[in-house]
Image (cartoon, rainbow, N blue to C red):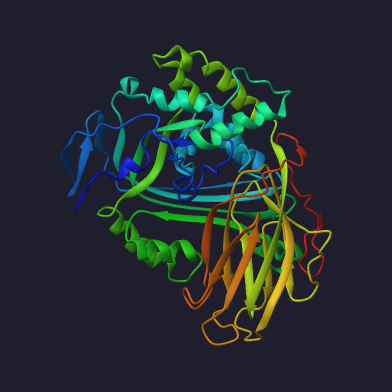
Amino acid sequence: MTDTFPPHSWLGFGLDMTSITPTDITTVTKSVLKVTRLITLSTKGEQQTFDGITWTVPNGVDVASDVNVGESSYNSYSDGTNAASSIEADASLAGKYMAVEVDVSANYSISKTFNSAYQYALFSFNQNLLQVGFEDWGDSINEDGIIARLKSIPDKFDPGNPDVVNSYRRLFKTMGSHIITGASYGGRFHAAYNGLTTSGKFDASVKTTSEYKTFSESVQKTCSCQGGDPSIAGKIASNPEDTGVYAAFQAWISSSRTLPDVMSMQTMTLWDLMSAAISSEIYNRAADVQAAFQWIVEHPAVHETKCRFVINSDWGEIGLLTPSAFIIPDPNSPPPTDNIIFSSTKITWGKEHSHQFQRDVTIDFIIRNDGSPVDIELSHGSDGSTGGNGQCAVTMNGTEYNNSGIKDNNWNTQWFYQCEVNPNELSSMPKEGARPKITQASHNGHINF
């Protein structure tokens, strides 16, 4: 197999660590900022073959074989604070569960991934085949591109001036706060579950309790399967709880050796890159950019985005996949009280396979978060007004995300990444992020806020 150089899609580009969720490699790849490559790649190179895989590797980039039999890991945590602090303190855990390798500057992106009110169960499988990285990037800094971006922000960061703060936010949003300097290739499976409140027990005995009902109705799970046979990977990622998933998982492991994909990315901070530049216009601004990043992550904002979910089928569901965001009812348009489950992470209307079709079932709600883009999944019944035309859609911040037709004739799930939210800040919020107060659920499945 010959490919020009797949890491060309990542190396030298930026990631905004004020906004992304670093656990899910699928989300991370969708978040790479490609407006300006800050470390350039040579246009010259040579073909190199690694375990039957041939790439045209640019000069100045090193590719090393790192073949292993694969490593799996499972950890559970009593609460999100414990999960975040454990991963921040243990590089080996971060390597297993984080799709982005960062230094302590990006601890905010880790801590906001975990809600202190929930227990967590994390599983990962990583099979490293190739490690790609710059040999020496000092002479490859895109100084013209950086200078052009720096001209869009004031010369001095002033945390007391909202316009200045927002200009630095835009800088990170367009150029990134961290720059990709390396990538691991192979196969990666990652699954994370949360939802049971810390007052409960995560074992089979709770399945008969009302608290487990709360968990099952509001559980948030993220699952990514990168590398290997894409049809098998898609099947696993769409339904990791299927009875045949283990056999599919074994088949996927075998295929990941011949069809590797990006598993994780290594980064350096933007200000460290700037400090190494030749131009004084760049290195004299490094400390200012670092101060802006630190202030922004220590003072996250509150954003509320009005959304509308419309279903044309016998059932439909929207799930929020971004851990730092949550769903609340719209006080000006309360959700219907019948046939609905409304939680902080998902809204489900109707019943699967009931064949009780309804047209234009409309549910208004609000997404509250720190202003970062969110990832969602939409699912619906196969049939609508006629067979095979089930449909659901959500509108947020003026954009409609539509899932129509049959995908697998079961959940018919479609994923949407980096959905923009309301850009207007509501107010400041505590460092740990605005969270719903988790209390005992009422009998109809609603979470009390």
Q: Nearer the viewer, residue 91 or 226?
A: 226
x, y (%) of residue 354? 64, 84
x, y (%) of residue 110? 58, 38
State whether residue 230 is above or below residue 434: below
Say if residue 206 shows up in the picture.
no
Where, quadrant-wise, is the C terminus in this rendering? bottom right
Residue drawn at (71%, 29%), measured in percent from left and top? 162
Residue drawn at (52%, 72%), measured in percent from left and top? 412
x, y (%) of residue 325? 66, 49
Q: Quadrant of residue 395?
A: bottom right
Residue drawn at (73%, 72%), measured in percent from left and top? 340
- Please indicate whether residue 71 sits to the left or right of residue 333 in the image: left
- Please indicate whether residue 129 sits to the left or right of residue 172 in the image: left
- Please indicate whether residue 116 sits to the left or right of residue 66 in the image: right
Say if residue 440 shows up in the picture.
yes
Residue drawn at (41%, 16%), measured in percent from left and top? 276
State whether residue 133 is above or below residue 194: above
Q: Nearer the viewer, residue 105 or 203?
A: 105
Q: Quadrant of residue 58?
A: top left
